[in-house]
Image (tube, grey):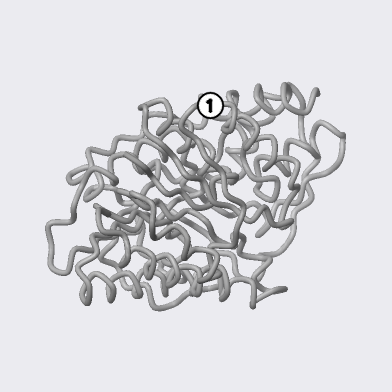
């Protein structure tokens, strides 16, 4: 069985590809290797994937209809669309990148899905950012999501609506997954664990926004991969066949507590510089995973006291620190 995986050189894509290959599945990985963050990290992930049988990489832009047209002849059974332009704060600087990758790219992938004769399902990445200004915690998939706080969040909510429409019009079975603050080995350099670790080990201060009054549902990468794999095996039992689920750890951790665990794992204290809330950010994220447990059998098992040391061990090894 062949899986078409976008964002294969990305953080989550890399881990998912490894899991699929370990199951004996064939993976066609797609990524344009853009320079939003250090391309060398993406290339290092790819080197490890390409060394494994069953993995094929094609460098192309999934938002380009012509580039993706060639995949229509492949015997693809599942599409896992993880490719996107990530990052809340960068969306304030380069909005066009988000509309192109996250909206146009989503439509291109669904148009491809229409042409695949043996396609069983599409699983795509949404985000906890869609909950925006919601104040009722934990966030449930049935909550109103009409107050996005960033363009990134707005594009991810748009993807969900587009997917619903394609499910309605063409019967394409789809599951959207709202990821909650994913972290772990091979993580993105623009996210807090990497930023904080690099600064702390260099003896530099870390910036803690909203004076430390922020909470996140930190979710370890292995739990996220388990949720994606489960979603690939389920066809939504609704009409049209489209469902959205939360993938989170179901724990709301204060940012300063997260930093304390990171400090313990590193064996050194951080110099903290407190700063105001940043535009586009939200104070809290917290996943209600009742439906995910019921329908996907999802059960996250990695608390930050276990996940952060694993991340730190990888960081020290990969960067030789």
Residue found 42% across the figure and 60% down from its top: 126
Residue drawn 56% across the image and 73% down it: 150
Crowd around label 1: few <14 · some 14–19 · many ≥20 (10 Å): few
Q: Which residue is mark 1?
A: 52
Quadrant for the N terminus in the image:
top left
Q: How many marks?
A: 1
SS type, badge 1: loop
Q: Is residue 318 above or below residue 162?
A: above
List x then y, in percent, for residue 267: 73, 21
Horizontal relation, residue 304 to residue 141: left or right: right
Left of 102 or right of it: where is 315? right
Quadrant (top left, top right, bottom left, bottom right) of the C terminus:
top right
Q: Residue at x 71, y 40 (%)?
A: 41
Q: How far across and down, in percent of the image, does residue 165 sit?
A: 28, 76
Closer-to-camera residue (74/93) = 74
Image vertical order of residue 135 relative to residue 197, above or below: below
Is 220 placed left or right of 95 in the picture? left
Q: Residue at x 58, y 74 (%)?
A: 100
**Where is residue 20, by image quadrant?**
top left
Please name whichever residue, 16 or 250, is drawn nearer the observer in this view of the structure.
16
Direction right: furthest residue: 203
Tell me residue 320's x, y (percent): 80, 23
Pick whichever, 97 or 110, lies toward us.
110
Residue 72: give x, y in percent of width and height.
Answer: 39, 60
> Looking at the picture, does residue 45 appear above or below residue 264?
below
The residue lying furthest to the front in this view is 73
């Amino acid at each position: 069985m062949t899986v078409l995986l976008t964002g294969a050189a990305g953080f989550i894509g890399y881990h998912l590809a490894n899991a699929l290959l370990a199951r004996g599945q064939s993976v066609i990985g797609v990524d344009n290797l853009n320079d939003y963050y250090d391309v060398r990290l993406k290339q290092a992930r790819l080197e490890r994937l390409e060394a494994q049988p069953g993995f094929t990489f094609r460098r192309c832009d999934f938002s380009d209809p012509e580039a993706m047209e060639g995949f229509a002849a492949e015997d693809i059974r599942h599409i896992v669309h993880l490719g996107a332009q990530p990052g809340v704060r960068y969306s304030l600087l380069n909005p066009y990148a988000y509309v192109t990758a996250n909206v146009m790219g989503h439509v291109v992938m669904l148009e491809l899905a229409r042409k695949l004769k043996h396609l069983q399902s599409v699983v795509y990445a949404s985000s906890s950012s869609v909950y925006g200004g919601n104040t009722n915690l934990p966030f449930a998939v049935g909550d109103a999501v009409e107050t996005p706080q960033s363009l990134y969040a707005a594009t991810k909510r748009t993807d969900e609506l587009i997917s619903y429409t394609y499910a309605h019009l063409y019967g394409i079975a789809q599951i959207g997954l709202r990821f909650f603050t994913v972290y772990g080995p091979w993580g993105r350099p623009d996210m807090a664990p990497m930023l904080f670790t690099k600064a702390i080990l260099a003896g530099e201060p870390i910036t803690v926004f909203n004076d430390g009054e922020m909470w996140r549902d930190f979710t370890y990468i292995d739990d996220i991969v388990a949720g994606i794999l489960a979603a690939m095996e389920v066809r939504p039992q609704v009409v049209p066949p489209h469902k959205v689920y939360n993938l989170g750890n179901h724990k709301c951790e204060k940012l300063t507590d997260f930093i304390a665990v990171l400090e313990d794992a590193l064996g050194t204290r951080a110099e903290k510089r407190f700063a105001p809330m940043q535009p586009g950010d939200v104070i809290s994220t917290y996943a209600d995973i009742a439906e995910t447990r019921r329908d996907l059998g999802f059960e996250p098992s990695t608390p930050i006291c276990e996940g952060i040391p694993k991340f730190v061990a990888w960081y020290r090894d990969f960067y030789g620190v």
